[in-house]
Image (spheres, rainbow, N blue to C red):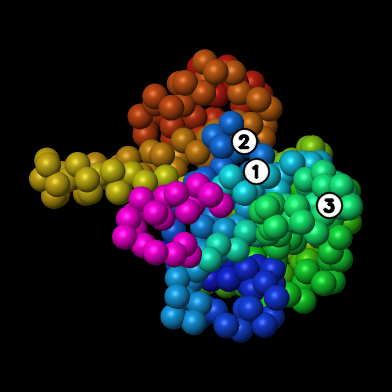
Amino acid sequence: MFLAILNAKGELQHLLPPELSAQLNWSTLKLEPGAFVDEELRASYSDLLFSIDYQGQLAYLYFLLEHQTLPERFFIFRQLKYVVRIWDKWLRENPTATHLPIIIPMLLCHGRKPWIYPLRFEELVNIPQDIAPVVLDFIPKFRVAVDDLSTQSHEALRERAMTEFARVTLWSLKTATNTEEMLRTVELWATHLHALRNARNGAAALATVIRYVFAVHERPEEVVLTTLAKAMKMEDNEVMATVEEQLIAKGRQRGIEEGLMQGLTQGREQGLLQGREQGLTQGQRAVLLRQLERKFGKIPAEFTSRVEAAPLHELETWLDRVLVAQSLSQVFNG
């Protein structure tokens, strides 16, 4: 949780006017639970709600990340609905309140083209010029603080005051829809990738970025992998090892946590042993699936199901075979 707040802090400070940012007590920044985006739009938007102290009062920073390649004309209206949902939730939790807290809406977008649609609500409403002075008093008035990565240079992003993970994340978002730009600028970002790798929890952070890059770029994974490895002066297998080690660690931790929960009802020692074995099994499954996809492409469901159901000793056998097998059948059937 602390690292998530630390990484977000630089972006939030960048979005706010300096005179407002100076009035906020950043040591009180806290990530709040809940998502307010419509469920059917969560593939296009992600949101985070932060609370913070503002001169002794509670305020909220509502951060929205836009995943669409093209801007949306009525986005500002959608943002108003989300802000109202936050106030609704707050009033349910504070039924005796006499005032609503401040909410500052923010948007991070990284589409192919600059954002061109209104970011002030009153600009969305069709108001005849001759009656505007009177009508505007009846129209909601607010704006969204916007970070449009399509208009930002790589040099400007590299100079931002934020954590290395936050900087590299912005680079991966900026180039998410343009593989050629990513390949062209990766050497420019090599020092930041190295710094991220060497930071505290850096291996996990770098693995997250690499997995995102693999997921969104349309060029073959081998091309992206080789380019990243060259820029970072690493071997291809070292880069992949970074990703795979984190998959194993994540699976192991998940298994240990599940085992600990079982230990509460089945006995501590038994739960711990089960947790360790489950964790190792989860990690081996993740690595095997990654290796199969890299070597044979998309894996048919029948083989994926076998991996998900297999015990640890069988997974280890398949991991040995995948190094020399020429087909999926040879991996699974010998």
Residue at 82% across, 44% down: 126
Q: Give the number of the mark in front: 3 or 1.
A: 3
Residue at 43% across, 32% down: 315
User: Where residue 203 appears, x then y in whole percent?
Assistant: 56, 62
The residue at which mark 1 appears reads as: 78
Residue at 52% across, 40% down: 287
Q: Could you give the CA–CA distance between mark 3 and mark 2, rounded to whole angstroms?
A: 36 Å
Q: Residue 243 carries which label?
A: none
Q: Which mark is residue 131?
A: 3
Side of 211 relative to 119 (left or right): left
Secondary-structure class at tag 3:
helix
Label 1, residues with CA under 10 Å away: few <14, some 14-19, many ≥20: few
Residue type marked 2: Leu
Q: Could you give the CA–CA distance between mark 3 and mark 1, rounded to whole angstroms?
A: 26 Å
As rendered, which of 172 and 49 lies closer to the eye?
49
Q: Do the residues labelled 2 and 1 touch (CB within 8 Å)?
A: yes
Residue type marked 3: Ile
The magenta segment is 83-101
Residue 89 visible in the current orientation: yes
Image: 107 above or below 154: above
